[in-house]
Every structure is written in structure tokens, then in C-alpha cells.
Image (tube, rainbow, N blue to C red):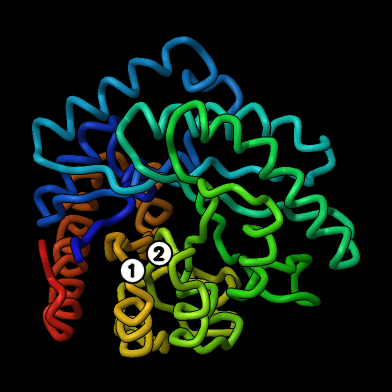
């Protein structure tokens, strides 16, 4: 397997797409997850014809630094929000187009988060309807849509898509070969799931992974703030079972990359807020952290004899 890492958190440290690609290349990564998660904001150039320049910038940066895009992540948004999903359906189709034109073979999608808890059957029906509306964009641009297991299980949060069977219910309900699963091991850990069983249950429907670590179903305090246990740290720091994950991926015949979604310590940007003279030091720290991440990933894959780069 090849190693990859998201560039999502790097926009805290850098101003341009090119700088984020260069950063990960310096750390050893030859593959990358393109994050649109925080890029689509009201007034952003992503909503204008200027978005084509972003596509060109990504493609030029990948060529210059020898990096291959392996998947993408849709923008933050809520297809079941109070606006009826209006903003979501402005953002996500554009991100599908951009991901495909950049060269990503797939893009990860989140399920909606209804403002009021829906009965499970109604939630599933609405969510299948949402993804069916996106399938024509996937067909037009030739890209897979990967549905991610998310959040905490009901009743902690109003989600019903937390297990492999939940994902398969949605995927089979959509009924398109372009819709598969993205397994987030951190979300699974927050829900106390057995990684091996869930990954092998997905089998050939598994098209991508989000790999990171956390303390499970807990809350922690960071800089005085209470945050969930979904901490997105480097592997082997907390309680995510990477032996079970690796055995599951191998036995499931997984063909994708070993893709990290490690954004902690995200608070570094907050810590230096208002002190621009510290940005160079913050970048050095992040470079060291992502270099460590690459080496930990390499160590894990070498243990199981599947490291490719």
C-alpha cells in the first residue's frame, strides 16, 4: 500500500494549495488526500469561475513535487440542515467536479445531520435520496462517491450511519457501482466497534479509509475546551487497534492507499493566533509532525509486508 495524508489542516499554516503539496512531499508522502472541508465558504473563489485556477494549481503542484491525488473530501455541509440542504447542494457538486478534474479517483461524503432526530427508516430514506441526487455528477465526471461512517451512534448524536451494515444499507439503497464506502477508523473507535469485523464486512465495497487515533468514546479538555474523543492524532498514540485494521484491510482485499486524516495538533494555529511572526516556527513543528506520521505509517505497513511508498 502507498501512504497518503490529507492537506486539510495545512491551510492553517500556508496560504496556497502548492505550499500544502510541497509540505507533504517534504515529509515523504508521494500520495495525498485533497481536502475541500474548510474551503467552500460564502464569498470563496470556489463559488466563482476562479475555481478553475485552483484545479490548475493542484495539477501543477502534483507534477512539480511528484505527488499523486488518491481521494478527496467534500466540503463541510449538512444535506439535512435547516436550509433544506440548499448550501450543501451548492458546494458538493462543485467539489465532485473539482476532485475529478484534479485527478482524484474518489471523494468522501458525509451523511446529513438532521436538526431533529428522525426515525431510522426516515433518515435512511432521506439520505439515500441525497446521494442519488449526486450520482449523476459522479457519472458525468467519472469519480467514485465514498460514504463515510460518522460521529457517535444514536442517541449521542442524530446519526444512524456508524457501522459497516449501516453503510451497506445506504450504498445498496443508492444502487450505483460508483458509490462505495470510506471507513473512518477513529469514528469506529468512538463507537466501540471491532475494526476487523467491520472492515471485512465491507469487503469489496470498501474504497477508501481515514486513519488516525483517539481515546475512544470519551471527552477530553484541550486549552480549556471540552472536545469529543474523535481526536485525529497519529496512530499508536491511543486506543485504535491497528493490528485489527491491517488484518482487516488485507483480508478484505483492499486496494486503496493507507490514507491518514491526522489533523491534530490542530490547536497550534489557534495557539499562535495574532502572532504572525511565529508562523515559521509553527510550520517547522507541523513538518516534523507529518514526517513522523509518514515514518509511523511506513513502520505499520512494513510490519505486514505491504509497504509500497
Q: Taking 89 as reference, is 77 above or below it?
A: below
Q: Which mark is residue 166?
A: none
Is 160 drawn above or below residue 175 in the view shown? below
Query: Which of label 2 and label 1 is nearer to you?
Result: 1
Q: Give the secondary structure at mark 2.
A: strand
With 20 as the anchor, is 198 left or right in this view?
right
Residue 10 appears at what percent x and percent y? 31, 46
Residue 139 rendering spot, x and y as whole percentages: 52, 32
Q: Residues within 10 Å of mark 1 (few under 14, many from 20)?
A: many
Residue 38, percent from left and from top: 49, 41
Q: Residue at x 24, y 52 (%)?
A: 282
**Residue 249 or residue 75, whichever sits in front:** 249
Name, please, the residue furthest toward the top: 49
Mark sitting on residue 209: 2
In the displayed structure image, the side of residue 251 where residue 196 appears, left or right = right
Q: Residue at x 31, y 73 (%)?
A: 234
Please tell me which residue is depicted at 45% across the width and 73% down the height of the picture: 203
Q: Quadrant where the N terminus lies?
A: bottom left
* Image coordinates for residue 35, horizontal then vertical, percent: 40, 44
Left or right: 296, with 167 as reference point: left
Q: Which quadrant is the C terminus positioned in?
A: bottom left
Label 2 to label 1, Cα distance in Å? 10 Å
Q: Quadrant of residue 56?
A: top left
Q: Residues at badges 2 and 1 in contact (C-beta under 8 Å)? A: yes
Of mark 2 and mark 1, the one earlier in the sequence is 2
Vertical side of 164 occupied by 116: above or below: above
Judged from the image, the secondary structure of the residue bearing numbered disc 1 is: loop
The residue that mark 1 highlights is 254
Measuring 65% from the left and 59% from the top, which residue is drawn there?
Answer: 172
* Number of numbered tags placed on the structure image: 2
Q: Is residue 38 left or right of residue 14?
A: right
Label 2 Cα neighbours within 10 Å, binned few <14 / some 14-19 / many ≥20 = many
Amino acid at each position: 500500500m502507498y501512504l497518503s495524508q490529507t492537506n486539510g489542516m495545512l491551510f492553517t499554516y500556508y496560504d496556497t494549495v502548492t505550499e500544502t503539496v510541497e509540505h507533504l512531499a517534504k515529509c515523504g508522502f508521494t500520495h495525498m488526500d485533497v481536502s475541500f472541508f474548510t474551503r467552500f465558504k460564502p464569498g470563496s473563489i470556489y463559488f466563482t469561475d476562479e475555481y478553475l485556477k485552483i484545479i490548475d494549481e493542484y495539477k501543477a503542484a502534483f507534477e512539480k513535487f511528484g505527488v499523486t491525488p488518491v481521494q478527496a473530501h467534500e466540503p463541510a455541509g449538512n444535506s439535512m440542515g435547516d436550509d433544506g440542504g440548499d448550501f450543501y447542494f451548492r458546494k458538493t457538486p462543485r467539489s465532485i467536479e473539482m476532485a475529478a478534474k484534479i485527478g482524484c479517483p474518489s471523494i468522501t461524503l458525509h451523511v446529513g445531520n438532521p436538526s431533529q432526530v428522525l426515525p431510522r427508516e426516515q433518515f435512511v430514506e432521506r439520505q439515500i435520496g441525497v446521494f442519488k441526487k449526486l450520482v449523476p455528477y459522479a457519472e458525468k465526471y467519472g469519480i467514485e462517491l465514498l460514504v463515510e461512517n460518522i460521529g457517535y451512534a444514536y442517541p449521542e448524536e442524530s446519526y444512524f450511519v456508524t457501522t459497516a451494515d449501516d453503510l451497506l444499507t445506504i450504498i445498496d439503497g443508492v444502487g450505483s457501482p460508483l458509490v462505495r464506502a470510506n471507513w473512518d477508523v477513529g469514528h469506529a473507535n468512538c463507537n466501540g466497534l471491532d475494526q476487523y469485523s467491520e472492515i471485512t464486512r465491507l469487503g469489496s465495497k470498501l474504497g477508501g479509509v481515514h486513519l488516525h487515533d483517539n481515546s475512544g468514546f470519551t471527552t477530553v479538555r484541550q486549552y480549556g475546551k471540552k472536545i469529543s474523543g474523535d481526536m485525529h492524532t497519529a496512530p499508536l498514540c491511543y486506543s485504535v487497534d491497528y493490528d485489527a485494521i491491517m488484518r482487516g484491510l488485507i483480508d478484505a482485499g483492499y486496494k486503496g492507499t493507507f490514507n491518514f486524516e491526522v489533523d491534530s495538533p490542530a490547536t497550534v494555529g489557534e495557539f499562535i493566533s495574532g502572532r504572525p511572526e511565529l508562523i515559521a516556527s509553527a510550520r517547522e513543528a507541523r513538518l516534523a509532525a507529518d514526517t513522523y506520521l509518514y515514518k509511523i505509517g511506513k513502520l505499520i505497513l512494513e510490519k505486514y509486508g505491504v509497504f509500497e511508498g
